[in-house]
Every structure is written in structure tokens, then in C-alpha cells.
Image (cartoon, grey):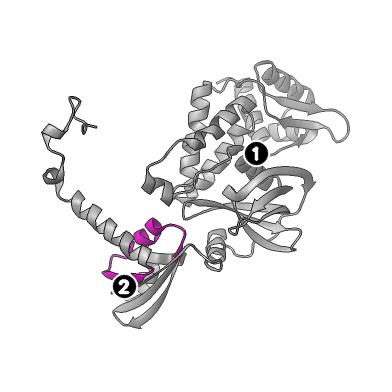
């Protein structure tokens, strides 16, 4: 790779990690003169990268949304598939991977043409299997998510409409600090200017976020671990289900497995009471099963029935071919006949 090509990649990387760069600072970071910087920017603009320039004392460079895909060696289908795949990772079970996925989405979506953003958003209507749909919350508006993610990156105040769990909509203005993945949902940790306090917002309940242009000095988060903070906030809000169970294992070991997803109260040296607040019964069942100890679910009744259904499905799964549909019930392709 030539030095010019390598410098162009460095330039694109810098433009993606910050909303606006003063010309002199960008040139200094690249180790080139401002004349060379202008030439490199012009070269990238000619091949399709939507870099906007502003003259004057406060002028500089900014990467904006384009009207066509820049040469990322991605077709429109590939770009849409890439963002959809990142959405799956962002709402998955691995917070470290989720952070990287949100960051990558923000970088990609900010340069996508509007028509492709709309195409990606429209895919949220695709049906999911009942169990999967219940256990994870899809990102309903990828542009809204990336707007908030970029505002976090740039320490820029955002205004948005927020719908609470009671379906009440309010207009908020906040200083966004972190996006956190907890229980397969994305949450925004932000300083709410109207309440003058920290607040946690579910990303899927945020609508029409708008970056105000007002920059702020980041505050120290209310907890060194933002995941711990969000879990504590979730625990203080009424949940759809509060699953109660007795687990036949030492409280310390059970607490280590369940972590911050539920509370554990010792009964004796070999058993404990567990309470899990969750929006999904699948999630509560997984937490209890992951404890590795025998347990009995006491309530609510929906949780008891849900665990019974889990038991039937898992038992059936161990039967192997004995439980498979007979050959005469299958069509010519080997799939079950309609």
C-alpha cells in the first residue's frame, strides 16, 4: 500500500471517530501540511466520500451522509446485510461485542444514503420465531440508534421523544454518555437536563432523536461499571414478571451465577430464595437453569407453566430420532408435509 493510500485510510478513520475536525488539527494528526490535507480530501471527495468542508477560523472537515455508496467494496445489498448483522450482535448476549457493533453501525450508517437507511429500517417488520421474538428486542430504528451513538461519541446534547413503560410520551433533552447492552436490550445512560439527574432510557423507546449542536464536558458516570448501574436501575422499576424460586445450592455460588439479574436470600447452607425481575420468562428460565443447581419455581403462574413447557421441549430434544416425524408424514423434499 502506498503512503498516499495509507494516509487516506488514516484520514477516513479520523473523520469517523469525531464529528468535526479543524483543518490545522487534522493536518497535525496526519503529519502533513494543510495543503496536502486539502489535496487528500479532494481526492476522497472525487471518488465518492461525502466530506464537507467549511472555510474560516472555525472551519474544518466533516464526514456526512452521501447520495451514493462510497467505494467501501460493498454493494447496497451487502451494506444493508452488514448493518442488519451488526444489529443482531448489538442486541446479543455479549456486551463487549455489542459495544463494538454499535460503534461500527454508527460509522457505517452515517455515510449511507437515505434510501438504504429506510430499507434497513423496513426490515424490522420481518417475522421472527415466537421464542426469539420474545427473548430479544429488535432495534426498531437504526438511524435513531446511530444518532444517539454518534452524540455519545461527540459529547453532544440530544433532544428526543421518549415513551415510558406506562405508554406516556415526553420530550427530553439529555447529555448522552454511554449505550449499554443488558438482557439483550440497549439502554442509554444520560444526564437528563430537565431532571438535573442521571436517567436510563431504553433505546427502542427513543423516537426522533436530534443532535442540538451543544457540546458538553462528560461527567463521571454514577457507577464505574455502566452495566451494573443499568441493571440496578432496571431492578428499581416494576418489571413484567417477578419470578420467585427456591434454588438448592449455596447462596454465594447461586449469586455468582445469577450475577445482578436477581436477588438471592440464603435459607440455609444448601438452599436459597431467588427473585428475578424480567421482561421475558425465557430470560428468567435461562438464569435459573444457568445456576447449575436444582430449583423449584413458585410463581407467578405464567412462570410455572413456562418452565413446564421448557421441560417438555428439552426432554423431547433428548429423544432424538424416536420423536422425529415418520417418513410417511414428510413430503418429497424430506420436510414435514403441510
N-term mark: 2 or 1: 1
Q: Is residue 239 magenta?
A: no
How far across and how far down the image is residue 130, in percent? 38, 46
Q: Which residue is mark 2?
A: 247
**SS for dot 1:** helix
Numbered label attached to residue 89: none
Residue 175 position (above or below residue 120)? below
**Depth check, front residue: 167 or 152:** 167
Numbered label attached to residue 17: 1
- In the shown orientation, is residue 249 left or right of residue 80? left
Q: Residues within 10 Å of mark 2 (few under 14, many from 20)?
A: many
**SS for dot 2:** strand
Examine the image and state in which quarter residue 64 appears. Answer: top right
Examine the image and state in which quarter residue 307 appears. Answer: bottom left
**Depth check, front residue: 253 or 247:** 247
How far across and how far down the image is residue 28, in percent? 74, 34
Residue at coordinates 23% horizontally, 56% vertically from top-left? 312
Q: Quadrant of the N terminus?
A: top right
Q: Residue furthest front?
A: 338
- The magenta region covers 277-300
**Depth check, front residue: 178 or 168:** 168
Residue 52 position (above or below residue 240)? above
Residue 74 seen in render: no
- In the shown orientation, is residue 104 left or right of residue 278? right
Q: Residue furthest right?
A: 57
Residue at coordinates 53% horizontally, 66% vertically from top-left? 238
How far across and how far down the image is residue 59, in percent? 83, 32
Residue 252 seen in render: yes
Q: Is residue 294 magenta?
A: yes
How far across and how far down the image is residue 194, in percent? 76, 59
Amino acid at each position: 500500500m502506498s503512503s498516499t493510500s495509507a494516509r487516506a485510510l488514516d484520514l477516513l478513520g479520523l473523520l469517523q471517530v469525531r464529528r468535526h475536525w479543524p483543518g490545522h488539527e487534522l493536518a497535525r494528526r496526519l503529519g502533513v501540511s494543510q495543503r496536502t490535507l486539502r489535496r487528500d480530501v479532494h481526492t476522497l471527495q472525487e471518488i465518492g466520500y461525502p466530506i464537507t468542508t467549511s472555510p474560516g477560523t472555525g472551519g474544518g472537515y466533516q464526514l456526512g451522509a452521501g447520495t451514493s455508496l462510497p467505494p467501501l467494496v460493498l454493494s447496497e445489498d451487502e451494506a444493508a446485510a452488514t448493518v442488519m448483522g451488526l444489529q443482531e450482535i448489538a442486541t446479543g448476549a455479549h456486551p463487549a461485542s455489542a459495544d463494538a457493533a454499535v460503534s461500527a453501525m454508527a460509522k457505517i450508517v452515517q455515510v449511507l444514503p437515505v434510501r438504504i437507511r429506510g430499507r434497513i429500517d423496513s426490515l424490522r417488520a420481518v417475522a421472527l420465531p415466537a421464542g426469539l421474538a420474545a427473548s430479544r428486542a429488535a432495534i426498531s430504528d437504526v438511524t435513531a440508534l446511530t444518532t444517539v451513538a454518534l452524540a455519545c461519541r461527540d459529547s453532544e446534547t440530544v433532544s428526543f421523544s421518549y415513551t415510558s413503560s406506562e405508554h406516556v410520551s415526553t420530550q427530553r433533552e439529555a447529555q448522552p454518555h454511554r449505550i449499554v447492552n443488558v438482557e439483550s436490550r440497549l439502554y442509554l445512560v444520560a444526564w437528563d437536563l430537565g431532571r438535573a439527574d442521571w436517567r436510563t432510557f431504553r433505546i427502542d423507546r427513543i423516537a426522533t432523536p436530534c443532535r442540538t449542536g451543544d457540546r458538553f464536558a462528560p461527567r463521571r458516570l454514577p457507577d464505574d461499571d455502566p452495566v451494573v448501574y443499568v441493571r440496578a436501575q432496571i431492578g428499581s422499576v416494576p418489571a413484567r414478571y417477578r419470578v420467585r424460586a427456591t434454588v438448592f445450592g449455596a447462596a454465594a455460588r447461586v449469586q455468582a451465577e445469577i450475577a445482578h439479574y436477581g436477588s438471592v436470600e440464603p435459607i440455609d447452607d444448601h438452599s436459597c430464595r431467588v427473585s428475578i425481575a424480567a421482561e421475558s420468562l425465557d430470560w428468567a428460565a435461562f438464569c435459573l437453569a444457568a445456576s447449575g443447581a436444582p430449583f423449584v419455581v413458585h410463581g407467578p403462574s405464567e412462570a410455572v407453566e413456562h418452565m413446564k413447557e421448557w421441560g417438555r421441549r428439552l426432554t423431547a430434544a433428548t429423544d432424538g430420532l424416536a420423536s422425529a416425524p415418520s417418513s410417511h408424514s414428510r413430503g418429497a423434499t424430506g420436510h414435514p408435509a403441510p
